[in-house]
Amino acid sequence: MREEGLLVLIHREVSMLCSTRTLLLVTLAMLAGCFEATGDPPDVESSSSELTWPLAGANTLVTSMNADASGNDGGCWDLPLGLPSNAVKWLQQFPCHGRNNQLWRFEWAGVGFRIHSSRDYGLCVDVPSGNYSAGQDVQLYPCNGGANQVFLVHQTNTRSSTIRPWASPSLCLDIENGVRTNLARIQLFGCHGGSNQEWRFHTYLDDDGLSCSSTVRFGASGPTVSTSSSRSFHVTGHNFDVQCPLPSPRHDSVDCPDNDTDWFVVDRLGGAGGYTVRCFHTDPGAPPPPPPPPGPCPRGWVCCAGTPNACDECRPPGGVCQ
């Protein structure tokens, strides 16, 4: 009897363990089904602060406010093409056409933005040799993580922003000699609030083509673009009627796929063939994301506030604490 009772007890314990194991497996299966339906658990790093600014990571057109008060027909940041491999690539203003050498990617770098060329992501906007002085031209240089490749974006009003080197924020990126639209270099200059230091940002959405081979007019009385030029201007709506006045009046249309479209760049490459209309969404620029929690400065940098392992303000090598 005692042996039988022991066997019954062992059988009961094993049954309970099996039931518990079955319940655990069912629970795990249900959880697996939940994650399969809703996606992986959120990645903490993927939701970090650099993604809160609309422009971060987007292909972005940077236009000048120097041509008119609404920003229409201002020049664009431009990576010069066709240079010898060892030539300095100076950042320049050029009439907007919206091709990939005029598109840029803003990467949050902890204290400011590193600005990459969309055509060649390995090139960054760079202050040569860290020479923070008025009149210094800005170049495109291989990205190296240096402080001279980090810039602040300061929103000045609802339309535009200034762009300043992080290591010397009293200087602004400035169009040399205040050239309105045409070719000119971008330099550092003391911030003065002028329109040649104000920049507007446009996120690339898509493009559409026009078969017209003559001057075109957008709407009944809107902007016109001639066969040998390109233009950049504000629009309302993503569907647009286009008139081709010559050689005989007819209509075409632009249909951008995104309702957020509010900016067109119209270009006729080489003055031949049809037009390309590039669709953008405008953002004047937002205050940069909040700084990360205090931590150690990069190697060789100076801690100006806090402790070495939890520094609130880091300055680049040779920097002076205020």
Image (spheres, rainbow, N blue to C red):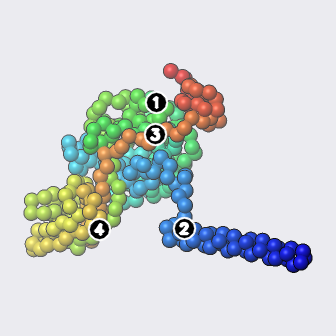
1 vs 4, front mark = 4
Which badge, 3 or 1, comes first in the chain's sequence?
A: 1
For residue 35, the mark is 2
Which is nearer the N-term, disc 1 or disc 4? 1
Q: Position of residue 24 (x, y in %)?
A: 66, 69
Mark found first going from the N terminus, 4 or 2: 2
Q: Residue at x 58, y 26 (%)?
A: 306
Q: Counting other residues with Cα less than 10 Å from the Cα at mark 3, is it few (<14), some (14-19), or many (20 or more)?
A: few
At label 2, counting other C-alpha atoms closer than 10 Å, the crowd grade (few under 14, some 14-19, many 20 or more) is few
Residue 165 visible? The answer is yes
Circle 4 sits in a helix, a strand or a loop, which is it?
A: loop
Depth check, mark 4 against mark 3: the one in front is 3
The residue carrying pointer 1 sits among few (fewer than 14), some (14 to 19) or many (20 or more) residues within 10 Å by Cα, namely: some
Specify the label residue 257 is tagged with.
Answer: 4
- Does 263 appear above or below 254? above
User: Label 4 vs label 2: CA separation?
Assistant: 32 Å
Select label 3 or label 2 by which is in front: 2
Q: Amino acid at mark 3?
A: Pro
Q: In this rendering, which labeled residue sits more in front, label 3 or label 1?
A: 3
Determine contact: label 1, label 4, CB under 8 Å. no
